[in-house]
Amino acid sequence: MSGQRTSRASMFTDQNEINELVSRLQVLLPQLNQRNNSRQSASKILKETCCHIQKLQKEVEDLSEKLTKLMDSMDISDIERRLLQDFLPQ
């Protein structure tokens, strides 16, 4: 019986931790945070998180491409070019 209580307590703690993390994600997501302060479902928050991360990755790729084009059009030294390229995703 004691083992069953420990297992339930552990599941309760895990669920509370998951709920806390999902709540923190909701606050970080601009599209959910702007709509209203009501609690969204965990699955919706996780889907929105994935979409937001993909959007950010696309923005990073686009900015990297723009920076590369800009570097190509500028007269910069090889050392400066290597330093800048270290910041670009591979």
Image: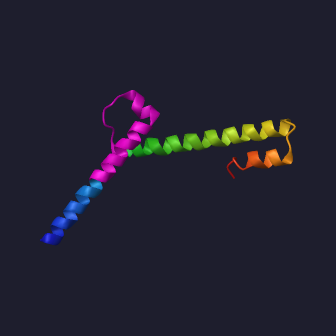
Residue 44 visible to the viewer: no
Q: Please state which of residues 70 and 79 is positioned toward the viewer in this rendering.
A: 79
Q: Quadrant of the N terminus?
A: bottom left
**What percent of the width, then of the height, locates residue 84?**
75, 45
Where does the image place residue 45, in percent across and percent down from the top left? 39, 42
Q: Would residue 73 be found to the left or right of residue 64 on screen?
A: right
Range shown magenta:
16-42
Answer above or below: position of 16 versus 63: below
Residue lying at the far top of the rendered structure: 35
Residue at 85% from the left image edge and 40% from the top image edge:
76
Characterize the magenta stretch by its predominant secondary structure.
helix
Q: Is residue 73 left or right of residue 29?
A: right
**Residue 32 covered by magenta stretch:** yes
Q: How many numbered markers are drawn?
A: 0
In the rendered image, which quarter is residue 54 located in? top right
Side of 86 where 35 appears, left or right: left
